[in-house]
Image (tube, rainbow, N blue to C red):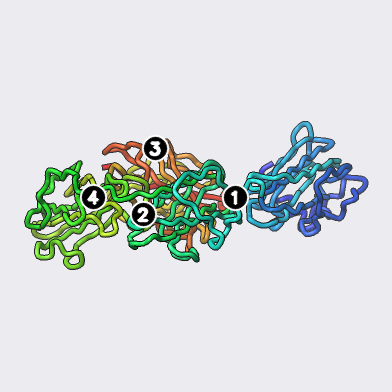
Amino acid sequence: MHRTSFALLATLAASSLLSVDAPAQCPTDDAWEDNDLCSSAVLLAPGTYTGLRTDPGDHDYYYVQLAHGYEVVVDQTDSGAFAGLRLGALSDCMGGTDAQESLGGAGGVRTLTYGNTTGSTISVGIWSGAWSSNTCETYDLTVSVVPGDCAQAQDDVHEPNDSCGSAVPIGPGAYPNLFTDVVRQDYFAITVPPFETLVLDTTRASGEPLVSVLYGDASCSTTIGESYNDGGSIRYFNADGAAKTVYVRCGVFAQGCTLYDLSVAFVPDLCDGSEADDLAEPNNTCSQATPLHLGLETGMFVRRGDPDVYEVTLQDGDVFLFTLTENSAFGHVRYYLYDDPAWCGSLTNGVVLSGSSQEPLYIAPHHQSAFGLVPHSGPATTYYLMVRVEDDSPQSCVAYDLFSSDTAGAYDRTLCHGDGTAGPRGAHDTACPCGNASAPGAREGCVNSQGHGAKMVMQHDYGLASNPPEVLRFQLRQGRPSAPAMLLQGSDPIALPFRDGILCVGGQTDRLKVLVLDAAGAVDVPETAIDGWGAVPGETLYFQFWYRDPALSTCGTGSNFSNALSAEIV
């Protein structure tokens, strides 16, 4: 029986229509009556209950008190093939998208399990009923409560460290087999030597997506770094001149638990002044600027106090696109672009564009990139691009590659429109799962519970990424307010009707970030480090949001997808 069939039965039972219009088929009630509604559900303790009766006009409701981290297992054995069993939160009368259901079937035996990872004790509802007319089903129930994956017994040796005030001091080394969940997040304190870089790596072994946040104060209120999902790397450079203690929190995003490994390392400045410079030298000032050869320049090198300066002349209508990719894991640079030689070299005046791979604080491991895009109109103009090592860079020298182009074609990079239109990438579009297409031309994915689709856009229209991959900026609008959303990346386009939308990200996939939409159903992803998997120029990566849309979702599955976007590796 489909879930909507249960919903209809539950509605009729709740309104007492079944008991009025369909006379009971069982000659006598069992000892647990009257328990015909969610509001009159009977509390059960673990054990076996025999000789229970139900018919189409007399459904039975029970509930179990379930602590966080535990699971309830219910076995039902009936006399025929027309009984049904359902488990779910009693608070919504087992109508949530996480409810478990088994109806009918030969043999008359069915088992369901429901776990609690909410962080508090909940009431789990048990529905048992017969759904065939002129049927009285006699059945037995066996109720068991067992530890789940998030039970207290899973905790690690560093407990108790569930608050910033109880953070456990740790130093350089590996810390395997750690455990955290929604109510028992882990806090650690790390003292970083002066002028050294803390490298904090987390790896999720199993369980829910892992969230790690680095704080710069003992109250854990000032965020200085973070990573999401399957783990990642956080780096912090201590430029204070004295040892500094920072605090890290490891937890899960919304519910459940996670097993993970943690490693801590300190990295000193490895530059000693003996490193060889690149062939573009001397180009340390604007008067010595080296003409920029469009395309990919590899093996470039810059050190603190010795910047690199390039020049390029743009014609009317040119679009100057450049990507600066750092090959030094612990050093970082900033670029400055000028269109007037009088200001060339200033860090504050006459700067047309400036950027760094270190903005914002989310830092991807290894290859880090900064991106620039400048459309030019009017007379031919010479631009100057200065690259310098940041004052707070952990390393005083940086090796980098520079890709540049003076043209870029803006074109539609959306796919899986969800609105019935094909567009330039129509081969990858398909119909929405339950006829919930958005308005023609909207290109916002399939309609959600808000009456429209959720639209994903990039901050710029060019959809270009460097290799090693740079940082892209995404936005999502018109999702379910206050719901979590996950940013997906894939190597291949697909078109698979799934949940309430169309899944368009396939091939080798990755979950980049988990975020919470605001009250308007929107979220900005300022920077997202993408995985290139060794992608080469000319290849394309695909991105899409998957967001929750519980209870009222159009097709009833509880989640949906935005449209998708592509980005070409250049």
Of residues 149 and 184, the one nearer the viewer is: 184
Which secondary structure, mark 1?
loop
Q: Earlier in the sequence, mark 2 or mark 1?
A: 1
**Residue tagged by mark 2?**
527
Residue depicted at 14% across the width and 61% down the height: 345
Q: Position of residue 376 (x, y in %)?
A: 16, 57
At label 4, counting other C-alpha atoms closer than 10 Å, the crowd grade (few under 14, some 14-19, many 20 or more) is many
Q: Position of residue 24 (x, y in %)?
A: 87, 48
Mark with earlier residue (2, 3) = 3
Residue found at x 11% / y 48%:
281
- Report which residue position mark 3 lands on: 492
- Is 254 on the left-hand or right-hand side of 382? right
Q: Residues within 10 Å of mark 1 (few under 14, many from 20)?
A: many
Residue identifier under label 4: 397
Query: Residues under labels 2 and 3: Cα distance?
Result: 22 Å
Q: Nearer the viewer, mark 4 or mark 1?
A: 4
